[in-house]
Structure formats: C-alpha cells, structure tokens
Image (cartoon, grey):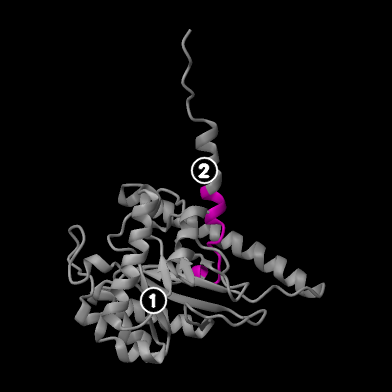
Amino acid sequence: MSGLNLQMPSSESDRFRFRFVKLLVSLGFWLLRSIADTSAQVLGFKRPGHAVGIYYHHVLPEDRNRFARQMDHLVRWTVPISADHVQTLPSGGRHTIVTADDGWKSFIENALPELKARRIPVAIFVISDHMGGSMGEHRDQIVSPAGLRALLPDIATGLVTIGSHTCSHSRITAIDRREASRELVDSRERLKQVIGREVDLFCFPFGVHTPDTIGLCRMAGYKRVFDGMPRPALKDPYEFLIGRVRVDPTDWMVEFHLKLVGAYDWVPWAAELKRRMLVAFRPRRLGPL
C-alpha cells in the first residue's frame, strides 16, 4: 500500500460530515469484526496478537487536557508498547504503539509530560534539516538539537525513541532514487550525531512509499519503517512496515476509541478502491483519426 488517503473536503461543514460518515462506517466495521472474532473463538480459532499504531503531530497548550484524557483512555483499554517492540504479542489483547511525526516542540512540551506520567513509550520522528526551525505558517517549531539532547534521559530508559522523518520532509516517491537514498542516510546520520545513538526507525513523509523505497530503507540500515495507513501491526514481531492511523487531541472520544481498537482498518481498502475507480474511469486520449 502506497499511503493513499481519502481526500478531505474543503469546507468546515463538509469536513464534519465526512468525518461523521467515516465514524459510522468504522463503527459498522468494528461490529462486524467483533462478530467474526467471537465466532472464530467459539470455533477454537485464535486471532494472532497485534497492535494498533497511532500518530500525532501538534499538541498545543490548549489541547493538553484533551490529550491527557485520551492517554487515560488508552491505558484503560490497551497496553502501550514501544515502536521497536520485537516480542510476540498475546492473542486477544489490545496493544497500542504511540508515535509523533515531524518532531514538533508542542508535542514534546505538552504531550511528552503526559506520556511520561503514564509510562507510555513514544517514538518521535524528526525532520533532521528543520531542527530548530519551522515549516509553513504554523506557529509551532521543530525541536532543536539542544531540545533533542534534553530528551537523552528518557531515550536511555526507552520511554522515548527518536526516528528519522527524512532531511527535508520530501515526498520520497516524488524524488529520484539517489536523492531518496541521500534523504534516508543523511537524516539518520544527522540524528545519530545529535543524540549519540543509532537511529533505527523511519517514518515516510505523507505516508507514501513504494516497494523500491522500502528496499532503500533496508539498505540505509533501518530496522522498521512506518506509514500512514491503518492496519493491524506486529502480527509478526519482526514486521518491517508498520501501519498507523492518525489521531488528534480534538478527536471525539468515541472516534479515538474506535481508532484504538482498529475500527479504521477499512480505510486502505476504500482508498485502493477509489484509486482503481479513478484509473478505470479516467478519460482516455483518442489517437489520431
């Protein structure tokens, strides 16, 4: 899967309706899956243990309390595990991998204290060439090298893991192979210089990738990579590509809960169906008469 997403509408009212429809579909998907899982258990089949990967971006000061309530809910319903977890997960349990993309200061200042208070491990994927700067017009900033080094005590305990998010946040599928390889290797080395530790995890900007770019990640020395499409994770403890679902502090609690239990795993299928329909119905150019 290349990280396809269902396009969000532009107006506020349309976005609300789109979000609500996704929630209803996810609720129906979760109910059907629950029935199937219960039936399988009755017949003596066990579903392999797995985890759900979630990812944040910004957690602004005004969103900290909402984020804290989400983390209370997370530890009440699931077992949080680290992004580099390589042990077989028990069947029937719920596990969550918490990650954050870009390395925003707001996440470190507002979300990390709440995670530490609950002993929830987190992987933070940092854009190495933007450390200490900003992107676009957002008032938030990317963590500086000094800010990253300040996390070393939490990195040493395994509570925080630093991963790469490329040097420049390039869409890895839109650049040539040599440039893609440079983005993968140089970002890893730059972050290693800052924290004095190996950087083994990588997250694809915009969630997009191809089999070739996954191969480049292996060649660059990464042990695990992450994209932006929800699907069950770690059915194989040494799984290389991990799917995730985006969450925000402003998510409704029922929305957040459904994401935690894997109810949004239908999204990749819908995105792929949309892609195939667009290809099938794309106007074909007529040849010369």
Query: Residue 149's image quarter?
Result: bottom left
- At label 1, the amino acid type is Val
Specify the segment rendered in magenta.
258-271
Q: Is residue 114 visible?
A: yes
- Count of marks placed on residues: 2
Give the number of the disc on residue 199: 1
Classify residue 262 as left or right of residue 65.
Answer: right
Q: Position of residue 268 (x, y in %)?
A: 53, 54
| Residue designated by label 2 | 274
For residue 117, above or below residue 60? below
Residue 202 located within the stretch drawn in magenta: no
Tell me the element at label 1: loop
Look at 81% across and 75% down and name the residue there.
44
For residue 227, above or below residue 17? below
Classify residue 189 as left or right of residue 202.
Answer: left
Residue 268 located within the stretch drawn in magenta: yes
Between 129 and 248, which is closer to the camera in this rendering? 129
- At label 2, the amino acid type is Lys
Residue furthest top in the image? 289
